[in-house]
Amino acid sequence: MPERDPTAPGPYRALLRLFPSRFRRRWGTDMETVFRYRLDAADGVGARVAVWARAMADVALGATREWISLFMDLGRRGRGMTMGSMARDVRYALRGLRRSPGIATLAVITLALGIGASTATFSVVDGVMLEPLPYPEADRLVALWPETNSNASLVREFEERVPALDEVAGIAIWTGVLSGAGDPLELQVGRVTPGYFRILGIEPQLGRVLREEDAVPDDANSVILSHGLWQSRFGGDPDIVGRTVQLNLDQLRSHVVVGVMPAGFQPYRADVPAWTPIPVAAGTVAEDDSSWYVSWRIAKLAPGATVEQATAQVRALAPELRRRLPGFFDEDQVAAAGVTPIKDDLLEETSTALWVMLGAVGLVVLIACVNVANLLLIRGETRARDLALRVALGADRAGLVRLLLVETSVLAILGGVLGIAAATSLTDVIVRLAPASLPRIESVSVDGRVLGFALFLTMGATLLSGLWPALRASRPLPGVQMGGAGRGTVGRGGSRRLSRGLVALELALAVVVTLGSGLMLRSLGQLLSVDPGFDTQGVVAFRANPLGDRHSGGAAFNRFYREVVEELKTVPGVQTASGINILAGSPGNWSFPTYPQDVEVIEEDGAPTTNFRAVFGDYFETLRIPIVQGRPVTDADRQDTEPVIVVNQAFVAEHWPDEDPVGKSIAFFSRDAVRYRVVGVVGDVRQFSLGRAPVPEVYVSHAQWNWEIPAWLVVRTIRPDVLKAQLRSVVDRVDPASPIAGVDDLQTVIGRSAGQTRFLALLLSSFGVLALLLGAVGVYGVTAYSVAQRVPEFGVRIALGAQRSEIVGHAARSGAIPVLTGLVGGLALALASGRLLRSYLYQIEPGDPLTVALTVGVLTVVGTCALVLPARRAGRVDPVEALSAE
Amino acid sequence: MAKTDHLGEFEQLALLAVMRLGEDAYGARIQEELDRTAAREASISAIYITLTRLEEKGMVRSWKALPTDERGGRARRYFAVEPEGVVALDEARQRLLCMWDGLESALDAAAGSAGGDGT
């Protein structure tokens, strides 16, 4: 026994256990002494942490090197590593595996499941997060403050006044209608300032990208087409550049194609089929630029400039902008001014979710490896005689370890191949299930890197699951194995202990994954059971877009929609029909600075903002939103009548908590603007997602608010299928040139806002089921093996008069200890790591008692089944047979 | 022995450090010597791993010395270079010198011109 340095910290000594015992016995004491010496010499906490960090890195690297060289040595000294001996080992391995096909099949399936699930998950993480963005100099691209809207002049001002930024562009998404040549098509159009394509650095396939002169008002009719639109709508016409197309957008009716982007172009924040310039007159400044619809900004860092420099410069500019543009930026926004690398910007909400997924699947792989290790340990036991025979015939330990490792490799390679095959189809499934809000999902595929990962995993699985059993099985235990079968292998009781330890570990990991998936499922349930504030049952929603020539001006828009509503009411089954500019659950928002009567607004701090909605038809009746007080706005509230408005309960709570809101007035954008008289109060609805609490909201009559904005129609019907089938002909009766889009049940539209939670819950629960299954297999395998080993003992007990039920109980009890240990340990681990999930949980705590109880319950039931099934076999032992076999 | 094993760079440094330290060659001192003289920050496990290899090749020997008074007085393992080690070091040196032969002037010229740019 080597002497120990009693002054060396315990954790360091524990760390040294990573080294092979040969090395540790020899150098352990010296290394402890040196470590103690360095730690004593370190001055201050920082220096001590550095000593620890260095020691940990040193041990990790050193131990890896030492183990590798140990095995290289063993291999070399074994029999001489030649292709011939390798081939012989593989042949032996295959023959050996054929002899216990049950264990081999179980191990291969286990590995295939683990490798398949994790490779598929990795391909998603790789495609979404790890692969570089497809732009030259992507590391110089940043997203620019503010997080709210800005206008095009502000974008230009940033470009001129922030030296760390080379070029800045603004991005917005509008809806347009492409007509002529085929059915009218509603499409999303990217409105961008001309620098957009230059910043991304992608050349067009045909023609040119946007230039400054394209953004001159009255002349801003250039359009760039995506490769897809060019192909589908214009048949890939090689002479498209210079052609005029009927694209109705805002006031403009026709546009000239100046360029076509190449296939595979991934436009930042504007993944749409066409892009047009945002018109800005020369000399316009931010104060009098009306293009406040610019939603995002992208910029390129000047050569050599850093994100920190650019952030500092933008932050220095923010207070001045807040002063100059009162009401637009509040204090918090000024404090948050800066730039963010676009990858971080795109992945903001996604990356933790993906890491959680990868972590969970990593645990599943670990469970799979532990499971295989256990199966191999069992196999090693049953092969004790075979191995002893080999030793007796002159085989050395190195050769045996190699043979056993080759066996594991064969299993792992089979598992790996099956796993990769599974991963390919699983990746497709994951991509199809992914919510639209998951960025860059289009770049997910099983490519070289993913295959590399799978290979790495396969090799890791071989070592992780094969090494320990191989070392144990090849341990020289002279004179024991040759003797007899069954419990004759008493010398290997340690193996059984190890095996039980592995089962406990496996179950602990399974608890972590299962509890995580349970929490996500419960969270999803909570989210979907949230009352959105309206009744979605039997409501069909769609967009109709009157951006045709016949409907110029807000009044014409309103007329179009009212006519469509009247036509919809003639469809059999329809109860009510109506519409709104921005439907709950759909993307986009109008939020205006608000000046409620009797509320003091300090311009410096920015006016409070309110969601603004314009409705037509019996909107509140269609969605069954309760009228709490007064009356709703109706189509009778027109431009030539008194301006009136309806507020929601959140608005009243925010601005007039103890007053009667009806009769008060509200102005928007400025104190002196038109004042709307409140005529009613309606119930709150969840506008953005089920998980976000209602915010102050107002509704005006679409007939009174004279803007050319496409709207959603909502129809309550008892025959949704009939309605959907007739929609086109209904709109045709009003205007055949108006496209319809987004036809869906309102329930589906709303449900989409829970997409990320649903996706994460689905994946995690599949991992949970997998973990549970693998855990059960582990428990079953070990119990079954232990029962088989003790058949003679049970035979004796039964012969001596023991009750069969006692025997079953005894067999099950001895297997129950690792199950219980695993459950308790796993629970502690799961509760400690639950915090990682917290931001994805809705109205539920990581330690939610019901979920914990359910998880423990499920695992207990599964664990008990896995215990009892093989234990029952112990009760069926025939004493005569068992004893005669001895 | 048919052929002397070639020494790697770090093996040479470790052997030289042991020789330089003489009777005072043990883990922590070797680490310091490498850092001070060769500006090489080596981890302690790397040093022990290398010295183990060299010992297996018969180039160094090690022994446990009696506890001393300093630092809690633990017994520590000391190293000394064996004749094989000296031979291997000498061979390595000769090989390098052969490779250098005739190149000194070229190196001086290159160093000279580099220095000249600076002024």
Image (spheres, coloured by chain):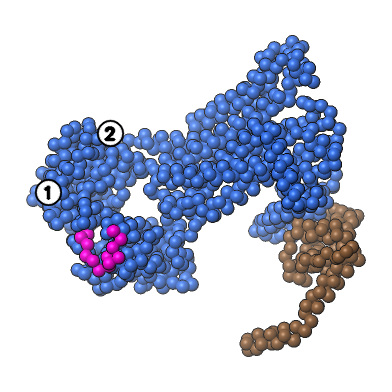
Q: Would residue A454 be visible to someone looking at this image?
A: yes
Hey, which quadrant is residue B77 in on the image?
A: bottom right
Q: Is residue A745 magenta?
A: no
- Between the residue at mark 1 and the residue at mark 2, the CA separation in whole angstroms equals 28 Å
**Vertical placement of residue A657 versus A263, above or below:** above
Q: Residue at x 16, y 39 (%)?
A: A568
* Marked residue chain, label 1: A
The percent position of residue A677, horizontal first and vertical second, equals 16, 47
| Residues shaded magenta | A235-247
Q: Colour of chain A?
A: blue
The percent position of residue A490, horizontal first and vertical second, equals 80, 29
- Farthest-out residue, top: A801
* Marked residue chain, label 2: A
Q: Residue at x 59, y 37 (%)?
A: A109
Q: Which residue is mark 2?
A: A537
Examine the residues drawn in magenta and state their main secondary structure: loop
Which sits in the foreground, A444 or A805?
A: A444
Relative to A605, A491 lies left or right: right
Q: Which chain is brown?
A: B
**First reached walking from the N terminus: tag 1 or tag 2:** 2
Relative to A525, A853 lies left or right: right
Q: Give, as a three-letter code, the residue at label 1.
A: Arg
Q: Secondary structure at mark 2?
A: loop
Relative to A862, B101 lies left or right: right
Q: Residue at x 76, y 42 (%)?
A: A471
Q: Which residue is mark 1?
A: A559
Q: Give, as a three-letter code, the residue at label 2.
A: Gln
